[in-house]
Image (spheres, grey):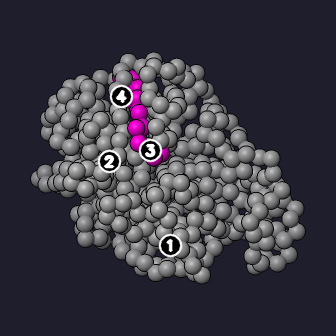
Amino acid sequence: AQDRVFFFSVDHAVGAPDGVQKPMLAVNGMSPGPTIEVNQNDRIIVHVTNHLENATSIHWHGLYQNGTNFYDGTSAITECGIPPGQTLTYNFTLGEFSGTTWWHAPYWHMLRRFHSVHGCSELVDSYLSPSGIDGTPGDEPVPDSGLLNGLGQWGQGGGYFDFTLNPNTTYRLRLINTGSFASIRFSIDNHPLTIIEADGTLVEPYTVSGVTLAVAQRYSVLIRTNQTQADGIFWMRTEIQTDMFTYDQPGQNTDIRGIIRYSNAPNPSAMPTAQDDPGPGVKNITDMDTARLIPAVQDVPLNRTRAYTVNVALENTSSGDFRAFFNGTSWEPLTGTSTLLSVRNAPTTFAPEGSSLNGDQFIITEDSIQTVDLIINNLDDGDHPFHLHGHKPYIMGTAPGRYVGQALNTKNPLRRDTMVIPAYNWMVLRFVTDNPGVWAFHCHIAWHMEAGLLMQINSLPSVAATLPFPQDILSQCGVPS
Ligand code: C2O
């Protein structure tokens, strides 16, 4: 084990990643930001300096932060944000996590688009990220185009990210949808993709022609560079799923491409020729069906000791605002304090056990270790990619309609931290409240989080109150040393 030390400078930048110049946010001048590559028992130390005019923070998506909830990076929940001009040092370990994940700023700062963290060595990385987002009040802004490893195409402009790969070699691509809204289908002409990992869970190898990733989901896929097409040059395709949009953007490009070149290609700088054909290599192979992702190692959940039902709805309110609700509550971030600070000041702030409301905050509190089923009924006409911080819940079941006691998969449910609940479907998520602190559960679509689709799990508050809070975290919220 070793210490891995990083310095992140968060600042404005100007770039034209898809050919259109636009203001961007960057870390160390880079977008996508720097990759963190660490081994399982390493300590990750990141000195984050905020050069923006508003407070910000960095969330380490998918990590457990066991004993370090204050470094989860969720402004208004676990910290108050790094003030402009200041530095916060995050210091944590991967814990039980291994696999592919990423880091980003919370969306309620609208600071994002820098990516990645992964837990072990690999051959090739790939980060996907829609860009070109412009806000239209009252409606969900749809992307104009997307980026594959920081490059995309719009109109006549932009560029193609490319990999040069050796022939007859197996490569692992780590796919991350780092976008704000749309799901993406990733494929490579002629090359089947063998999925081996979903959000850090190893799955039985499953070969598909394309992988669909909702926002914040990750997959590792293996590809074999054994195709015999003479020019040895192939499209990588990132297709934005437009069924999520209520309108199309004029000039929108939903077919973002990159290039794979075999190192023995006769003309290595040629463009791919199979313009619109996925190619014979993937004929008769179907797209990924998430129901067919089976954990490679069986992991049997404990029996539930507690259950909560939450209904999800999105509405235009009478005042004309677009708001999103968990059981009728729509979250608004606290300012100048955090939920965790309330817990530290008074561990019994929220009801000792059960769900409670604190202003706009819907909070489930368990001050003993419980195995909780979160029963979610998505009553909305859209699909939502939900993410639970600090845990990797078991997906116990999902189907159309509302949950009324249908049988659950207690034998080999998949665990992952980001799962899509389709429109008008239910899903049951099971997790254990053994990780002290306050954990967000939210839709990872930026606009839905901003519209309030976030609730919190307050686990073991009497333990969380005694965690060794760093003074920097307290000072952010105005607590003197
Ligand atoms: Cu990717 Cu709340 O986070």
The residue depicted at 63 percent of the width and 71 percent of the height is 161
Per the image, label 4 sits on a secondary structure element best described as: strand
The front one of 243 and 290 is 243
The chief SS type of the magenta part is strand
Earlier sequence position, callout 3 versus callout 4? 4
Which residue is under mark 4? Answer: 309
Which residue is under mark 2? Answer: 315
User: Does residue 234 lie above or below 60 as drawn?
Assistant: below
Earlier sequence position, callout 4 versus callout 1? 1
Indicate the amino acid at tag 1. Pro
Mark 3 Cα within 10 Å, few/some/many (few <14, many 20+)? Answer: few
Earlier sequence position, callout 1 versus callout 2? 1
Which residue is under mark 3? Answer: 381
Per the image, label 3 sits on a secondary structure element best described as: loop
Indicate the amino acid at tag 3. Asp
Which residue is under mark 1? Answer: 250
Q: Position of residue 305 (x, y in %)?
A: 38, 18
Per the image, label 2 sits on a secondary structure element best described as: strand
The residue depicted at 73 percent of the width and 46 percent of the height is 286
User: Does residue 226 lie above or below 328 as drawn?
Assistant: below
Q: In the image, which residues are magenta?
A: 370-385
Q: Is mark 1 within 8 Å of ligand 1?
A: no
Mark 2 Cα within 10 Å, few/some/many (few <14, many 20+)? Answer: few
Indicate the amino acid at tag 4. Thr
User: Does residue 299 lie above or below 339 as drawn?
Assistant: above
